[in-house]
Image (cartoon, rainbow, N blue to C red):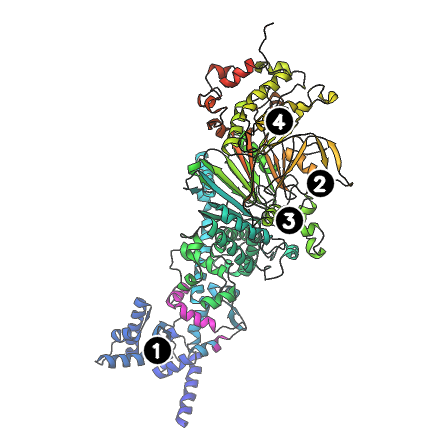
């Protein structure tokens, strides 16, 4: 003990003399230099420079091994060290002892890696930060980081726990600081916000390095961006064209072939909103199982939870069954999509909606806050303006991922993303699925293998596209569906140029105006163009394009009736509130289907709650079907008349389709009610009212008796009612047709020649039983209404006369319905003519149809920029399938060959074919041979006296 104390005292004296410069390091023995190193009186480099030869030789061998291998194991050291022993185990033991001594002196450090002690050089600066992190396995890095508490920890405490030298640990922690994984203060170290966001796992540490690399590359690319600036107009054109090509939606190609193809549109379900009409949806699904659509195009199945934005709308969410939560809403959406997949013959297409956008936006705002530290990894310092710019770039990048990748992914897998707690239960790491997906995208970007844990959590096939064996297609973009076998294109957009929640009074104006301008500029437009957002069925036809707003499946009628508690109904930013207050119209929910035929016909099938009531009331009965044939506005005698189309339509409707109800809704003849009528229509020779009536009888009478006709309605149009003098004399200028057809059937009845005799009515004097006063009103006005055997009721008049009606014929019907209110409550469909164009709407549970006739553009219309859309219409009513509207275009009628006894041979000879361009008849504006002959001879025969 005395000797030890004396040696310690002598060493202290030598150290004092050394510090005064009286001694050099060479005056110390080897053992004393070791003690100096341990006392931190000399550096490791000074110690190494004064090693004895034997130890110096050992260190030289170790240094060479480190330079070559950077790290090594004892088995490698045993081969490299100049040892004077033989035998494998003797060398290993001796080598281990030597290495232990160098570790004791702080020149080496060992880390336990894959059950082996691996030796690192512990000299400061031997490794760069990058190399050190590459040499230390992620598993070991994870084990160090897992020891870091949320509070400050001294390095010596951590070194003692890890059993490694503080100096070498400081090298490791410095590397961690450079990666942003730790923060340092006078109080010690603790894990950074980055690790709190990403979690601590081998996979997340690898991912964070990729985030850093991605940020560095993005910054470098921005700095080098000047080199990519177009240098001339040609490069500028190519640059802009390339950008547009990258952003252009690619069409979906349908290879289905058949006589017709059926498309169903079901949208604005918005699970999570209090007004989702599940009764209608459930019944609609059963109806679709009979209809068997080929494609079902859908949108807006999830309302969202309004996290971070539009929090006022939280009050409109469903508060039972956890449907106010986004994860439950996605499960509900998946249940509906699975049911639709079982029904669809080809595909179910889901298009992301405005509400999906709001969900994406809220998640990105949250992510920008939650992961703001991760986003900064590897980025250099910026001026404040640059920080703002980069924040915008981060938003764009995250929003692109959220909208184009994550939102479709959730619909493909049928659930929302898992949060960190839920993910931990699946893969054992506390990290959100959103961040896992972002990491996966980075692994792919840098061609790195994706961790198996991540593959266990994320469906990689669904992440990058629709699943191969699924009927489900999910897209954030407008749906361009090309029907190659039908030579037609379908365009479905969730929202055509509307704001997210605005509910317009004239829902058709914006899309219709866009369509008309596109056509005016010569652009090709699709056959069918639809928009989900406005939750109102509304449509028209402009040349070769049908354009529709589609109904939704929200039913806020209880709010309109004042039956919803005010706290849950007065949500100003909610669409339902805007529909009721701004539009002043509770929406009519519905499901719409279209059947497109190769021959040009289009069938529209509508399902709503009023139709549902009729069908469910007769669900145990046999099918009862009515086929209603509607026509008006032939204007026979006018330069614009096209009687060949009308003849072929009635032939098809009454003989091929076996129509049992016929409506002739006015303007059958041109009449005589404006001064230049004679000069304008002289080429047709039918300038007297009597000649027009005679001509009408000559072409229509031969079509009767029709084989299945049970009822016929005749109503005056303005062209009959406004013939000069008719209003003074009370003359009914359509009675001639009523009397002729009535007499025709009376003659048949005398001989009992027919099985059915139609109820023919000339509707002019009516009683409206649904008035405010008891007994009902008696009215002299051309208006008709019939209750059909199928259980449905239609009402019809030629022209609607409300004051201040609006922009379109539908506005006239809508205002008329709004004015007359309860009087129309028992009807299911309202029919009108007069305007020579096709319009359709579904308002107040009532289908409104404004239908054209068989005349072409007049001077009156041309001067005002109005374009008639001639076509025929057949409406099928069934107590099993509802209401189906069949539109018969001219292209179909011109190809159709008559089958009725009166016209079969005439048509077979081509006598109903209208003149073709290039012929003399076409040049002079003649009609077909048959019609031209009638024009020349009808009401023109002279009797000898």
Which residue is identified by label 1? 102
The crowding category of the residue bearing disc 1, from other C-alpha atoms within 10 Å (few below 14, some 14 to 19, many at least 20), is some
Point out residue 423 in the picture as x, y percentages from the top left corner: 48, 65
Residue 196 x/y as whole percent: 52, 66
Which of the two discs, 1 and 3, sits closer to the camera?
A: 3
Disc 1 or 3, which lies upstream in sequence? 1
Q: Distance between the residues labelled 4 and 3?
A: 53 Å
What is the residue that sits farthest to the right in this orientation? 773
Rendered image quadrant of residue 136: bottom left
**Sequence-first tag of 4 and 3:** 3
Separation of residues labelled 1 and 4 (CA atoms): 121 Å
Q: Which segment is the magenta one?
A: 128-157
Q: Nearer the viewer, residue 387 or 290?
A: 290
Q: State left or right for residue 379 relative to residue 101.
A: right
Q: In this view, does 931 lie to the left or right of 735?
A: left
Q: Mark 1: which secondary structure?
A: helix
Tell me the crowding category of disc 2: few under 14, some 14 to 19, or many 20 or more residues within 10 angstroms, Cα based: some
- Residue 556: give its label: none
Q: Mark 3 points at which residue?
A: 575
Contact, mark 4 vs mark 2 (Cβ under 8 Å): no
Check if residue 155 falls in the magenta segment: yes
Labels 4, 3: front one:
4
| Disc 3 packing (10 Å; few <14; some 14–19; many ≥20) | many
Residue 248 seen: no
| Residue on which the image places disc 4 | 742
Which residue position is annotated with label 2? 823
Looking at the rendering, in which quadrant would you find the C terminus? top right
Q: Does the magenta stretch include residue 225?
A: no
Front residue (pair 730, 320): 730
Label 1 close to label 3 by CB (< 8 Å):
no
């Amino acid at each position: 003990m005395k000797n030890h104390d004396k040696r310690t005292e002598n060493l202290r004296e030598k150290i004092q003399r050394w510090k005064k410069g009286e001694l050099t390091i060479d005056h110390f023995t080897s053992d004393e230099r070791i003690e100096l190193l341990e006392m931190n009186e000399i550096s490791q480099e000074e110690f190494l420079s004064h090693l004895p030869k034997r130890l110096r030789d050992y260190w030289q061998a170790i240094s060479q091994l480190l330079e070559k291998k950077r790290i090594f194991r004892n088995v490698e050291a045993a081969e490299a060290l100049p040892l004077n022993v033989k035998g494998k185990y003797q060398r290993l033991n001796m080598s281990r002892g030597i290495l232990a001594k160098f570790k004791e002196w702080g020149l080496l450090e060992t880390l336990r890696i894959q059950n082996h002690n691996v030796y690192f050089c512990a000299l400061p600066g031997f490794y760069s930060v990058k190399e050190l992190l590459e040499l230390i396995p992620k598993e070991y890095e994870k084990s160090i980081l897992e020891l870091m508490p949320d509070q400050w920890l001294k390095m010596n405490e951590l070194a003692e726990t890890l059993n490694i030298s503080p100096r070498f640990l400081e090298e490791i922690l410095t590397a961690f600081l450079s990666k942003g994984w730790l923060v340092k203060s006078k109080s010690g170290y603790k894990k950074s916000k980055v690790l709190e966001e990403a979690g601590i796992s081998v996979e997340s540490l690898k991912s964070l390095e990729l985030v850093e690399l991605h940020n560095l590359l993005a910054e470098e690319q921005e700095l080098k961006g000047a080199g990519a600036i177009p240098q001339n107009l040609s490069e500028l054109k190519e640059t802009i064209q390339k950008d547009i090509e990258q952003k252009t939606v690619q069409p979906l190609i349908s290879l289905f072939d058949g006589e017709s193809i059926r498309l169903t549109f079901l949208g604005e379900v918005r699970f999570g909103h209090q007004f989702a009409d599940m009764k209608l949806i459930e019944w609609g699904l059963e109806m679709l199982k009979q209809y068997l659509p080929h494609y079902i195009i859908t949108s807006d199945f999830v309302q969202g939870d309004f996290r971070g934005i539009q929090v006022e709308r939280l009050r409109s969410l469903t508060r039972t069954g956890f449907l106010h939560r986004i994860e439950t809403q996605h499960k509900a959406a998946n249940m509906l999509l699975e049911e639709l997949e079982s029904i669809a013959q080809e595909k179910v297409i889901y298009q992301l909606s405005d509400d999906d956008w709001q969900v994406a936006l809220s998640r990105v705002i949250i992510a920008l806050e939650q992961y703001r530290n991760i986003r900064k990894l590897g980025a250099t310092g910026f001026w404040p303006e640059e920080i703002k710019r980069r924040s915008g770039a981060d938003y764009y990048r995250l929003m692109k991922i959220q909208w184009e990748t994550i939102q479709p992914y959730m619909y493909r897998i049928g659930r929302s993303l898992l949060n960190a707690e839920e993910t931990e239960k699946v893969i054992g790491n506390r990290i959100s699925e959103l961040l896992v997906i972002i990491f996966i995208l980075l692994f792919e970007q840098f061609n790195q293998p994706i961790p198996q844990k991540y593959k266990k959590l994320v469906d990689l096939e669904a992440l990058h596209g629709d699943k191969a064996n699924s009927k489900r297609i999910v897209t954030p973009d407008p749906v361009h569906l090309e029907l190659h076998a039908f030579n037609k294109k379908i365009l479905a957009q969730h929202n055509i140029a509307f704001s997210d929640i605005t509910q317009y009074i004239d829902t058709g104006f914006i899309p219709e105006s866009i369509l008309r301008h596109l056509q005016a500029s010569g652009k090709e437009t699709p056959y069918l163009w639809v928009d989900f957002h406005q939750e109102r069925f509304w449509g028209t036809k402009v040349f070769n394009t049908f354009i529709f707003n589609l109904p939704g499946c929200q039913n806020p009628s209880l709010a309109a009736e004042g039956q919803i508690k005010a706290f849950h109904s007065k949500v100003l930013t909610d669409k339902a509130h805007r529909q009721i207050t701004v539009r002043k119209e509770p929406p009519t929910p519905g499901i719409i289907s279209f059947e497109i035929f190769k021959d040009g016909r289009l069938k529209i099938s509508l399902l709503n709650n009023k139709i549902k009531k009729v069908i469910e009331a007769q669900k145990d009965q046999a099918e009862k079907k009515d086929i209603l044939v509607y026509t008006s506005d032939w204007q026979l005698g006018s330069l614009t008349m096209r009687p060949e189309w009308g003849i072929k339509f009635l032939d098809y409707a009454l003989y091929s389709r076996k129509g049992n109800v016929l409506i002739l809704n006015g303007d059958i003849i041109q009449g005589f009610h404006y001064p230049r009528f004679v000069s304008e229509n002289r080429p047709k020779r039918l300038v007297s009212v009597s000649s027009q009536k005679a001509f009408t009888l000559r072409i229509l009478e031969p079509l009767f008796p029709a084989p299945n006709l049970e009822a016929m309605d005749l109503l005056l149009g303005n062209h009959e009612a406004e013939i000069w003098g008719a209003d003074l004399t009370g003359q009914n200028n359509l009675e001639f047709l009523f009397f002729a057809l009535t007499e025709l059937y009376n003659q048949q009845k005398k001989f009992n020649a027919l099985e059915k005799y139609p109820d023919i009515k000339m509707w002019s004097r009516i009683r409206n039983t649904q008035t405010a006063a008891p007994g009902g009103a008696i009215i002299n006005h051309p208006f008709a209404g019939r209750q059909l055997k199928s259980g449905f009721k239609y009402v019809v008049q030629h022209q609607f006369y409300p004051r201040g009606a609006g922009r379109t014929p539908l506005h006239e019907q809508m205002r008329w319905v709004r004015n007359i209110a309860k009087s129309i409550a028992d009807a299911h469909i309202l029919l009108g003519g007069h305007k020579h164009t096709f319009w359709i709407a579904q308002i107040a549970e009532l289908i409104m149809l404004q239908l054209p006739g068989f005349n072409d553009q007049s001077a009156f219309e041309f001067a005002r920029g109005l374009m008639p859309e001639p076509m025929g219409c057949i409406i099928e009513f069934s107590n099993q399938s509802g209401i189906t509207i069949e539109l018969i275009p001219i292209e179909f009628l011109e190809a159709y060959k008559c089958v009725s006894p009166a016209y079969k041979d005439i048509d077979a000879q081509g006598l109903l074919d209208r003149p073709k361009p290039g012929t003399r008849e076409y040049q002079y504006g003649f009609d077909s041979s048959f019609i031209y002959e009638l024009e020349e001879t009808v009401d023109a025969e002279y009797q000898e006296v």
